[in-house]
Each structure stands twice: as C-alpha cells, then as structure tokens.
Image: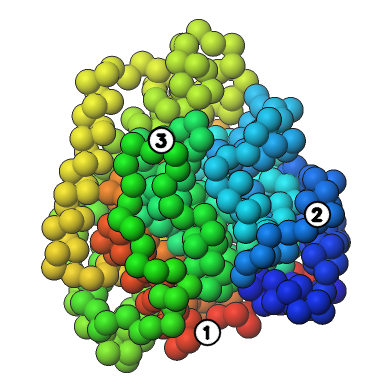
Amino acid sequence: MDELAELDGMALSALIAKGELSALEALDASIDRIERLNPSINAVVHAHFDLAREQVRHVLPKGPLSGVPMLLKNTGFEAAGMILSTGSELHRHTVSQRDSTITARYKAAGMVILGKSNTPEFALSFTAEPEAFGATRNPWDLERTSGGSSGGSTAAVASGMVPVANSSDGAGSTRLPASHCGLFGLKPSRLVNPVGPVAAEAIAGMSTPHAVTWSVRDSAAMLDATGGPDLGDPWASPARPGTYLAALGALPPRLKVAMLLKPPTGTPVDAEVLAEVRAAARLLEGLGHQVTEIDDAGYDGEALKAAWRVIAGVNVGLGAAGGDPGSPNIARLEPVNQEWVREGLATSGTRYLWAVNQLHASARAMGRFFSRYDIMLTPSAAEAAPKIGTLAGAGKSLDAFFDQFWAHSPFTAVFNTSGCPAMSVPLGMTPGGMPVGVHFGAGFGKDALLLSLAAELERAAPWAGRRPPVPG
C-alpha cells in the first residue's frame, strides 16, 4: 500500500474510478501511513478517521479527485464534527458545527477529509511550532521546520500521508512551506476561492485558501472544484477562461519575466537560494521566455511590512479576544502573540485605515508592474528550511520575532496585499539536500497563466520522483 504514496491525487482517483482500488482502501492506506509516520513528523493534530470512514460508506460524487484522502488546515477551515483549535490551547476542544464553503466543495468533489493538520497558533508564524501541539518536522530532515503556517499540511503531503492537503496563505503560508518541503504551492488570486460562509475576507483580504500538492494538475483540479464566488461575496475575481486543468494542456505565450533578487526591505538572501533562482531563469530562457533582472518592483516594502503587522494584530485581537483588551483569553495565548494582540487592540482606527490603504497602494503598484512584465521571478524564501526553533516566537519580543518572520520570506507578502496570484515551484535543491522553491507571480486574475507556466516547468524539469527519505 505504500506504493500509493508515490501517486498524485488524480492518479489515485483514476485507480478508484477503474475499480482497481476502492475509496476505503485508499483511505485505509493513508490512515496506516499517518499512524506510522505522524509520531516522528507531527503533521496531523486532530485525526477524524471515523468521519472519513463515514464519508466513504456513501457513494462519493464523481470527479478527477473523487476518493482522494486529504487534510484540512487547522486554522480557518470548518468541517462539521471536527476540532478547529487554530493551533491554540484556547480552542483545544472547539468542535465545528458546520462546513466552511470550501470544505463543502471538497466534499462535493468526492474528496475524503481525514482531519486537521498542524499550524502555528492563529497561523501567525512561518513555522508550525505551536506550544499547544508541538512542532511539525520536515520529512527531508526531521531536525528542520516544514515551514508555516501551512506546515502540517505540507509535511503530510511531502511524507506521503495524503496526496494533497488544504492550506491558506496570508503572507506566504502556502508557498513558504511548499518551498521547504519540495511541493507545488499556489496562492490563487483574491477570492478565486471562497472564505465563507461567515467571513467575506480574511485579514483584510490578504489570506487566500487553496492547497499544497505534488503535481500541478492536482492543484488545478482542486481549484476547478473549489473556485468561484460564494453567496453574498462583496466582490469576485475575474471569471476563469474554461477550466484550470484545461489550461495545463496549452503552452503559455513566450513571457516577459522580471527577476528580482533583492528584497525590498534590504534583508539578505542565502547564496544557495539565489543560485537556484538564477538556474530557473536559465531554464525559462531555454524555453524561449525573456528574463530581465531588475532591482525594484515599485512598491514600498517597509510600509507593507508595517501595514501587515497592524492588520494581523487587529484581526487576531478581534478573533482571540473579541476586541476586548481585558479579555482573560489573552493570557492563554503564547507570549509573543499576547504582545501582538495587545498591540492590535491598542491600534487606532486611523492607523488601521492607513494600513488598509497600504494594501491598496501595493495593488496599484503591482498593476503598474504587470503592465510591463508578465511574470515576477524571485526566491520563495530567503533560505532553505532552518532548524526547529529558529523561527518560533518562544523567548522573543514581538519586534524581534516579526523582523525575523518578514526577513525569512521577504518576497511573498506583496501578492497577498495586492491580491495577485503567485506560486512556489520545487525546482531547486541545496548542496545539502534540502528543497528550494522558486517563486513566480502574475497579474491579478492571471491564475490560468501561472498554472500553464507551472505545467511547462514541470514537463521541462520534473520533480515527482524527488521524494524525502522518510521511513515506511
């Protein structure tokens, strides 16, 4: 059954559709692998195998991912009967009474949800090391982080526990762990995927749900299954041209690519990461694309950094403490998040509006940028996955933690603030054997273009056979 762990979701679903494997057998194979590997990796924090088995007792809806086992991220995604603890002791026993819109769409596509994957507390870190549930370890090296905030989902897919897993991305939280674990991670355009039924947007529209996958086609199939506006959405992304899966079959036009290697806040990038981005640029040129190195993308990186901190603090302060500076809930948070929540709750309305306006300014800047270029090429992260504990907030002030947070992934957040799509593609490896993702961004609504480029890169430099040496 371990051979199934080598398949992507669409290949697994095809076996089920042919009758060569049942959905229950596929589910049992995932459960077996989770039970064997999770004690060392800690990717799954809330197992709901009983609910998954109940799902497959019924006839599953047909589709390219029908019968495929998957996990939901343990922040922001509800599934009726499943715990949603958001990585926090505060919600350790909180059980959802309904499905999020995107959860309902996964089920309508025939996907089988096994439980929840590990995240940092309230998704406020680039490493999945919540004090309440412990650190998720990178399957490529168990002493290193899998990244965050979708670190549990990413480690689960990289280790073969499940073929695909749900994620979300508010500053790079799909793309950053995908880079660290050697997976494909797409952040779609704002509101291509819904965040309802209650919320209209998450952290002022910066957080976008989707998935981490081995193959580009799995990501496209998931986006076909979940994409589209929710009832009552205040706005919507541009309509997609046909299906995203269909976009993979056509070569993208020859593209004007701008390569940016200097972070807008001036922080360093490891030489081994820069080498992999330059190698990707040569690959693009070999495919006929035009690559030009630039020094500046035209947005204010320092203002964006400050705005992100303000918006995240206010939003988590509302969610964790109900907007009440005297709430006893604050004392139950991790110390660095206590400081962040208190800062957020002390923020004035004018300061918050200033921060929102910085997001809009970044959207204007990206609009201007993508009127000149088709693609922005950067590192996904400034370094390969660091050791466990390096990026965690324990023992750090909020200032020190946030500076490190931003420096670790300095190129990704502008695609959240502007709403533009972006992806981390697993093209590189360090000399020490750790994955390095290469980051590509496009103009708002150009998701199909990005996926088409990703498919071209996957054909030219396939990564499916490059798997971590996990036991079992």
Vertical position of residue 383 compared to residue 390: above or below: below
Is residue 56 toward the left or the right of residue 344 in the image?
right
Residue at label 3? 232
The reply, left or right, for residue 433 in relation to residue 142 is left
- In the displayed structure, would residue 450 be above or below residue 358? below
Residue position marked by numbered label 1 in the rendering: 462
The residue at which mark 2 appears reads as 58
Q: Amino acid at mark 3?
A: Gly
Q: Earlier in the sequence, mark 1 or mark 3?
A: 3
* Relative image position of residue 145 (x, y in whole percent): 60, 55
User: Gap between marks 2 and 1, in whole Å?
Assistant: 36 Å
Badge 3 element: loop
Q: Nearer the viewer, residue 69 or 316?
A: 69
Q: Earlier in the sequence, mark 2 or mark 3?
A: 2
Which mark's residue is nearer the viewer, 2 or 1? 2
Q: Secondary structure at mark 2?
A: loop
